Amino acid sequence: MENKTVQILKAKRRALWRQRFMENWRVFMRNPLGRIGMSLLVMFGLMAVCSYIPPMIDPMYHPMTGVDPKVVSSVGPSWQHWLGTDFMGRDIFSQLLAGARVAFLVGVSAAFMSVVLGTAVGMTAGYMGRFTDTALMRLADMIMVLPTLLVVLMLAALFGQLSIWMIVLMIALFRWPGVSRIIRAQTLSLKQRPFIDAARVSGASHLRIIFRHIMPNVLPLAFLYMTFRVTSAIVIEAGLAFLGFGDPGTVSWGMMLQWVWKTGYMFQAPYWLLPPGICISLITLSFYMLGRAMDEVLDPRLRDETQAG
Amino acid sequence: MRKYVLKRLAQVMVILFCILTILFVLFRLAPGDPVTRMVDPEMTPEESQHLIEQLGLDQPIWKQYLIYLKNCSTGEFGYSIHYGEPVAKVIWEKLPNTILLFTTAVLLSAMVGISWGKIAAWRKGKATDLGMTIAALVTHTLFLPWLALLLVWIFAYQLDWFPITGMVSDEVWLDPDAGFFTKAADVLYHMVLPLTTLFLIHFGSYLLVMRSSMLDTLKEDYILLARAKGLTERDIRNKHAAPNAWLPVVTSVGLSLAFSINGGALTETVFSWPGIGRELVFAVSQNDYPLAQASFMLISTVVLLSNVVVDVLYAYLDPRIRY
Amino acid sequence: MALLTVENLGIGYQTAKGLLKAVDGVNFSLEPGRSLGLVGESGCGKTTIGMALMGLLPPNGRITEGRIVLDGVEISTLPEDELRKVRWNEVAMIFQAAMNALNPVKRISAQIMEAIQTHRPDMDDDAALLRVEGLFNLVGLPLERLHDFPHQYSGGMKQRAIIAMALALNPKLVIADEPTTALDVIVQDQILKETKQLQSQFNIGIIFISHDISIVADVCHDIGVMYAGQLVESGPAEEVFFNSQHPYTQALVSSFPTLAGPKTKLAPIPGEPPNLTGTIPGCRFCDRCPKDTASCKLDHPKWQQVGPGHHVLCDHC
């Protein structure tokens, strides 16, 4: 039923979108924080991709099950093992690569889930208003003040060992309130705009308004806020693994730190203590920088400030 | 104001009630027999029978729930399986230690973060600002347990300046001649590394918030008026800009309390600091559910009450807010 | 001797696109107890002049030429420490109340006392408070609201508090930057009347900055009309308002409605002021001028006398 004008309007809107996207991308890349964050992330991405290579070269490089038969305890860096081996002769470098994979997996999937959940809740609360709004926001307030790491720990106490997917799910379940507040505010301001009224008058259902008219307008914001969620998900998983409640079937950086701490090698094996910690800290830093740079893209006020200074 | 505080305390009670209910439901849903999870197998049959009656584990489920609520509200969380002692006794001993470390860390990092953030904003774009901002960004994103291990490795192991773990030295506390100050100094000596860990992780976020809040404030017209009044730059910064710039920092302290208590538990665990955070971790690893539940409830209470304190402080600092 | 003399004043802002000449070759003087209204669109440089008079140009702004002499002292070259003593003591400023000029977390009394005690360090709290009470009476604020916070005041009360603050040290010169813009008409009228009365009572010189020429004509002795960083017409208020010569002034006068008098059509001024970063060869208004001729674009216009004390920067008037 689309006539020509509508098509032209749509094409125009798409062109505008592309133009805005390019403009934002330029602002983003001009920011040193954004550039550093991006390059660090590319590096970690390469690590994650490369994590499949060492086990293919030799099964002894398998991060979890591969043991160098010539090594019985932790040894320092060598040609065979670039970063040395852990207490039972597993290669630390290949563990580090595998850790990058786990970090991305946990960070991105938990962040994605919490953003989807937070967006859904925020849009519903903002659009429905009244009682639904109050109830959902109270719930958000309540969850927001709880220490997520300890909550997940408590769930581990109740249900025993949690698998990596369970951990991801738990993090997502407890990290959505921040997103939902931002989306709710955005929805509230969108609700005042004439085009929503126009849609309602022309007989669109609530669901249609939410999905066709509000969602496309809040999604960019939601996904930009995802970067901050990635950071907290990675840190929570690492903390959990460090305390000994990670998924025993995966090698994460937190897990590596737990091994070096619990097996008593931390005073003798800096080659083992340093890399996982540096990696967790750097990946956190890079997502954080990315988030700050994106904030600047989103908030023109910040943009002006940096330009003037 | 009083009405507001009472209202907030009522909210805290409601949230605690919700958490208790959720824990109750989850506990019944979880695999395993509730009796074996709550009762120490090494108890004599009479003792365990008494405990089962006290916890109401032989009653129908709705009655169990009521007894559970009653027990929790009076602080009866059952017996710790590991310690063989009432849970309440175990955790009440640990609470002051946690509060000592946690509040000192939060206050210290907030104070330093605020005053350095003020300076950074004032010297925006200069070397001081750049150095402080980078330092804040980096320390703030360090992985806390790793930083703790690093500090132990360098300052306790390599340099041997501080004890590796613990909160007190036995020889000081068992010495009958040791006075209060000797003991306090001993605790302080043990506290240096855990405190440094928490401080390094936290001051950065306060610094960054204060810096950007201060930069926003400096654009306000009352700053221009203050300058027109002939005040010195120092007075403008300290008497006019800073009191306004604090407000968002206080909010951010409130929002980051949950994050801080996560860090507190990790720090306590690495340094074997005898607090409730470490107790929770320990209880979970030992399958000591009564102890884990009680520690968790106590930590939640501490977080929720600290939030109330932060909100009241905000209302006190901002005259526009009167409840 | 004149209280204030501004000679050939030029002020520039360093921007990403080069030096922006916000004020260019402005001359005027003010006798004690007289008032001068500076009128123009936003961006014409009137506020910049106000800030320069207090030595409060933003970090990227500086005086590029000319001088400002206040009471025999050249303040355009005064070092910061000396300038600080001049501020508020000799030149005070009335800010716009809606502009959030009062610090939201400090009590009104404390903010005024601070202004007094900064310049009278020997005055103790009691004496300063007494002075504040006197000021409150002067501007018609109730004494029981002395220790309120700004958010507890209405817009008109805030404006009075700011006026009280400006009068605190009996300054010789007060700069009023759009002092009544955000107030409703009745309060605006009251405050303007009182300001006028206070001015003659204390013999204060006032520079009144506004975009509304009808208000300025009502309050001030003299008017200076500014356009794109230049003064284009100046003279006694009545003369400039009722007998305006410069096309820009004429446009300004007819773009505001009058309550009394014949019903006339409001005429918006078409076009935009020129970009001030480059050099402009001819008259700055010629792009929007109905009387524009070819020579206007080429040569700088000259000042012409058109009446007693009434001057115009236009070759065709």
Image (tube, rainbow, N blue to C red):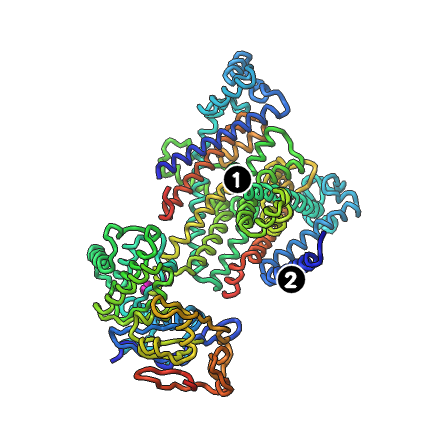
Residue at 59 percent across and 30 percent down: it is A157
Q: Residues within 10 Å of mark 1 (few under 14, many from 20)?
A: some
Q: Taking the image as drawn, is residue C127 in sight? A: yes
Q: Nearer the viewer, residue A75 or C156?
A: C156
Q: Looking at the picture, does residue A220 appear above or below residue C303? A: above
Secondary structure under the numbered disc 1 in the rendered image:
helix
- The quarter in which the N terminus of chain C is drawn is bottom left
- A18 sits left or right of B294 in the view: right
- What main secondary structure does the magenta stretch of the protein show? loop
Q: Nearer the viewer, residue C28 or B38?
A: C28
- A238 sits left or right of B94 in the view: right
- The quarter in which the C terminus of chain C is drawn is bottom left
Q: Chain of mark 1?
A: A
The disc at residue C91 is none
Q: Amino acid at mark 1?
A: Asp
Q: Taking the image as drawn, is residue B153 in sight? A: no
Q: Which residue is mark 2?
A: A19
Q: In x, y percent, where is residue B305? A: 43, 36
Q: Nearer the viewer, residue C98 or A142?
A: C98
- C209 sits left or right of C89 in the view: right
Q: Amino acid at mark 2?
A: Gln
Q: In x, y percent, where is residue A81? A: 72, 48
Q: Which residue is mark 1?
A: A133
Q: In x, y percent, where is residue A158? A: 60, 28
Q: Which residues are magenta?
A: B229-233
Does A100 appear in magenta?
no
Residue at 35 percent across and 59 percent down: it is C183
